[in-house]
Every structure is written in structure tokens, then in C-alpha cells.
Amino acid sequence: MSQALDEIKIGGLGASRKRVEDNRFTRGKGNYTDDITLPGMLHMEILRSPLAHARIVSIDTSKAWDIPGVHLVLTGEMMATRNLAWMPTLSYDTQAVLATDKVRFQGQEVACVIADDPYIAKDACEAIDVEYEQLPVIVNPIQAVADGAPLIRDDKENQQDNVIYDWEVGDAAGTDRAFAQADVISKLHLHYPRSHPSPIECCGSIADFNRATSKLTVYMTTQAPHIIRAAVALVAELPEHMIRIISPDIGGGFGNKVPVYPGYVMSILASILLERPVKWIEDKTGNLISTGFARDVYLDGEMALRQDGKILAVRMHTDADHGAFFADAQPSKFKIGLMHSAFAAYDIPVAHLSARGTYTNKAPGGVAYRCSFRVTEAMFFQERMVQAAADDLGMDQAEFRRMNFVRDDQFPHRTPFGFLTDSGQYGKCLDVGLKAIGYEDFRRQQKESRARGRLLGLGISTMTEPLGAGNSREYDILGIKMFDSAELKIHMTGKAIVRTGARGQGQGHETTWAQIVAHELGIPADDIVVEEGDTDTAPFGMGTYASRSTPVAGAAIAMVSRKIRAKARKLAAHLLEASEEDIEWELGRFYIRSAPDRGVTIQECAMAAYSNMPDGMEPGLENTAYYDPPNLTWPFAVYIVTVEVDPETGVWDVLNMVAVDDCGVRINPMIVEGQIMGGLTEAYAMANMQFITFDAEGNCVGSNYMD
């Protein structure tokens, strides 16, 4: 009779375990960057440009220096003397730390002040006198490539225009042939407007350089501590082993806290110069107008169709507005991210995608906001094109999707842009959603209501999101392969600590990672502590963004747990005086195959690892694993919503919403459902046109929540 532990009771896979991190958050005991105070700490504020494009004629900082309590005023000219006026971005571009020649977007950093408190520093920033010479402004890709457009990046050698890249993927010639055979060609022009992740906590850092030890410690709001450490080593020319990045609790990220921001670099230099800790905490307006934006992509899409509804080919061209600097964090090989993940769920013979990125006079954009790289944009364009094609053919939108889905027996399936998907039940998910929403009944109600002047609508959206970027053959950022890591230590009493190179910002890592270990080793999740975010203790990893933590860092945790279990098996064989080949495993316990009642627990093996190991075995029960994923994972979803639209005002109300997610194994169902709810909340905001726009002069319309 099995003596295996009950996995749900110990908090393993499938348990809706309450988030352990919420114990401190709900009690006001979180430890965020702004909560940290160091002895002798100074405060930094940044002066930002009010103009989107202007030559800097002069900067007079004399009045700022005269204010009592001011310790340092930095300008671009001063940064240049230390070769720190510019810094590399995560996309092989350069970005100004403090402007030297001109400003290139409203909100760009022009100077900074370090003072005894933030109020003195802010007053001193206002005392700085900057004379500007205004220049013509570019606010979209069409203007960027127009004849006679002003050159935004005239600082770059051999940069002749405002184009960052031209990139393509797919079969252009085959797509042209398919379009020539089409009965109907559906066309669509779209703009996915610029939006901002807008985390509750803005960006910030505390740089603390210790002259006695030559060690730099930086507390900061980063989703990728190890990548930041490498970037700081390159920018500040400090040895990497003397840099410690600590990412404490993070109040939301959504991709916004992946890039390297000028404020980080300025606080580091200030701490080195003053030999005191320097804190910089961004205000909300600074965050909204200067940090990483998302979306802002234009599409020209075409679909070649047979009259019976079969999709023959797809042609897409996108123009991405990257702002003044190409500073997002996309895999090096894929300039527009994973935009070519579009149509992965559809059986389309051939497709071609071309993409162009341009500079404009806006803050840098393109972060992976609540998705893998650019996948939200890809799915938005995909489903709008599918809907337009169904309308052009006069077909029911659900039936059009169903007839073009990849069938269950077609896996593994090569997508029209070359990805390999391993499994899926797309038609079944659609049927589940249609049944839940009452599709046929609603269609009848819709027709009847229209006759009475009521406007009811129904929308369907499907998505396949490639997660877990990615395998080292194709995925890197700054040349660093996108593997991830985990370190697991089992104490002699059977308690455990797991550390990873990921960094959670609300996803529930401290809860979920322990559940993976519980599943693999049978150690109760409550006996496992999770640590992340400190480069001095965590193994190297790429951080948390772009929907990759669980497929990559989570897999690393499973791999290191299995390494631990393999050593524990040897210990069990020693304790049971049996051959290792005769030892079997069930959750939490090893036993002899021929005598199932004779067994030892994982906790007994842990004690033996320190007190009774066999001859020749290294003591201890700990290990590290690095996981390089062989492929992406491809969860699928169908979301269906019904609405009523006021015919006079256009205001709409949601009547019903159904979300069907085929996400694979749910480690913690409660957290999965919470993530879905969070995504829906943000989706409602965007559907209600909550985005950030710019006027013709490049002024950010939406620089605070009141606007």
C-alpha cells in the first residue's frame, strides 16, 4: 500500500495555496526601495526637458549650487568628462544619461541635483536655468521617414535617417504567389496606441559605494538584477564581482522595470563621487513621461482568401515607434520581438512579415508589457485581421476561425513564420467558450434587440502566446543566452531554501516555486523558503519579464530538485542497506521495491547527508541547475465578450465575459485565476482607450492620472 504524501495537503502542484508573500504585504511590512534608509544617505532629483526636440544652448547651475544642503549638481557636460554621458541600451543602441547636445523627447534627463533631502534637491532643480533652441518634432513613424524629416539621432556616426532597422521573416515570393490566386483579399490598417505599464511603485535606486572596500551596492527597482549588474559593470567600468544589485520588493513591473534608466547611472556616479549613499525615487509624472512605454505599432495587414473561407496567405507590415532611443529588451535576433508569433493557431500555408523601427521624439518604447516580446500586439493584429476577413466574406466569425484552426491531428505544427508548436486543442477551446457564452442564443437576442433599437455585440479573440524565451540557439539579450537558474539547499532537518535568477513583482514566485519543490521532493511547501533579487546570493539568471519565469526558472527549480532527489536516492540505499537499483520513489519517501514497508523519508535522507553518508560521498544536500529550454511553450486561449452599445453616445457596457485558457499544468490554480483577472482588468482599460498620446509638439498628453 502506498505511503506517498497527499500532494495537495503539502502544498504541491495543483494546490490553491495562499500567497505567502501576502502575509507581509497585507500587514504593511513589504520592503520596497523607498522604504530603505542608509546612514548618511543623500537624495537625488532630476531636471527634465519641457521640450520634445531642442538644441541645448546653455545650462546655468550656479543658483542651484548656492542653495544650502546641495552637495552635487550633475550635467551632461560633467558626465562626459567621465565618459558617462551616454550608456548602452539592451538593444545595442546608446542612450543619453544626461543630455549634452540636445534633448530628444519631453521628459529627457538634463541635469540632476543631490542634496540633504528630496525637497531641497527639487528646489535646486527648479533653480537651474536651461536655454533651448527648439527644433522640428517627429511624433510618429510616418513623419520619421518623410522626405526632409529632421534627423533625431545626429549623435550617431553614419546615421543618415530615422530608421533603426528593417527586418523581415517568412516567404515573400510564396506569399505573392498565394495572393495572386486569391478570390478575396482582405485589407486592414491599424494602430495599437502607445500605452504605459504604469506600476504603482515608480522606478528608483539607492547607490552605496564603499571606498574602503571598493564595493558598490545598489538597491533598485529592477526586474532583472543580474542583467543590470552586467550593464553597470560596462557603463561604470567597475569589476562585476564588486557590484551587488539588490532588488527588494517591487510594486509592479509589467516590463517597465527591465531597462537601464539614466537615473540609476546618475545615482551610482553621485555615490562614487560623494562617497555617501544616494537615493533616487521617481515621481509619477517622471515615470509616465520618461520610462519604458509599450505598443505604439502600426500595421498594414492583408489576407488572401478563398471564397469558401480558407486562408491562403497572410502579409503583414509593421512600423514600430521606438522613441528617441532603441532601449527595449528584445531578443537580439528578433528586432520587433515575437511579432511573427501571429497566426500560430491558424493553418496558413505561407506568410510574410516585414517590420521597420523608427526614432521619434518620444520616450523610448517597446517593452514587453504583460506579454512575451510584442506578442500582445501580434495577437491584436491577428484577431482584428481574422475578424475583418470574416466580415469581408460574410461568414460567421466563430465558424471562420474554426475552419482555419490547426487541427488536433496536425501537431507538431510548423507555423507560417517558422515556429514549431507541439500541441493544442484549439477547436475544443472555442467550443467550450461558445457554449459558456450561449453563442447561438445570444445571436438570436442580438437580432431581436436590433429591431427594438438596442445594439448588442459579441467579440471573439484567440491567442497563442509563445512563452519561456528561450533556447540558446536563437535567444539572447546583449549576447547573454536566455537560460535561467535555480539553487536548492536542503538543511539537515529537511527544511529547504531555493534561490533563483528570476525576480517576482506580484506573480507569486515565493509561493509557486516552493510548490514545485514540494512536487518533486515531497517537502511541505511551508518548509521551503524562496529568495530572489540579490546578485550576491542568487545564481545568475535573466530576471522576470516577457512571460518566461515559470517555463524557464520554474523548470530550473524542477531540474535542481531532481538532482537533489538523485543524490537522496543514494543516501536512501545506504540507509536501507540495499542496492540503488532496488530503490523506488513515491512522494516524500524512498522504499525498497521488494519490501515497500521498508523506507526512509526525504527528511531522513537530508539528515544522513550531514551525519551518515556512505564512503566517498560528498556531504550535504544541495545543488544548482541551469535550464536552457529546448523550445517555447504555446498556451492557447479563447476569450469571448458580449456588450451593449448606447446608439447615441457610443458608450458600451460588458454583459458577459468568458475566458477559456489552455495553459497546461496549473501549479497554483488560484494564482492562475488571479493572473487572468489582472490581465482582463488591464484589457478593459485599453479597450476603453486608456492610452497615452502626444500632440504635434511632442507634449505627452497623459503625464499624470488627472489627464
Image (spheres, rainbow, N blue to C red):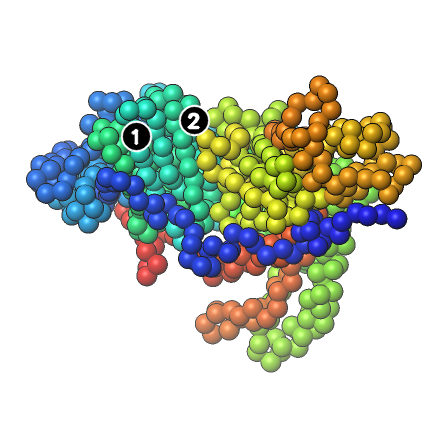
Give the Cα distance between marks 2 and 1.
Answer: 17 Å
Q: Nearer the viewer, residue 152 or 200?
A: 200
Question: Closer to us: mark 2 or mark 1?
Answer: 1
**Disc marking residue 230:** 2
Hey, which quadrant is residue 245 in on the image?
top left
Against 487, is 241 above or below? above
Residue 102, percent across and down?
Answer: 23, 33
**Disc marking residue 525:** none
Residue under pointer 1: 209
Hey, which quadrant is residue 487 in on the image?
top right
Does dot 1 land on a helix, a strand or a loop? strand
Check the image and name the residue furthest to the right: 594
Going by the image, does 538 lie left or right of 425?
Answer: left
Q: Identity of the amino acid at label 1?
A: Phe
Q: Nearer the viewer, residue 30 or 678?
A: 30
* Residue 170 seen anywhere in this rendered image of the structure: no
Against 705, is 68 above or below? above
Residue 21, percent across and down?
Answer: 52, 52
Q: Identity of the amino acid at label 2?
A: Ala
Hey, which quadrant is residue 359 in on the image?
top left
Does dot 2 land on a helix, a strand or a loop? helix
Going by the image, does 623 lie left or right of 278?
Answer: right
* Residue 642 seen anywhere in this rendered image of the structure: yes
User: Which of the image's four quarters has the C terminus?
Assistant: bottom left
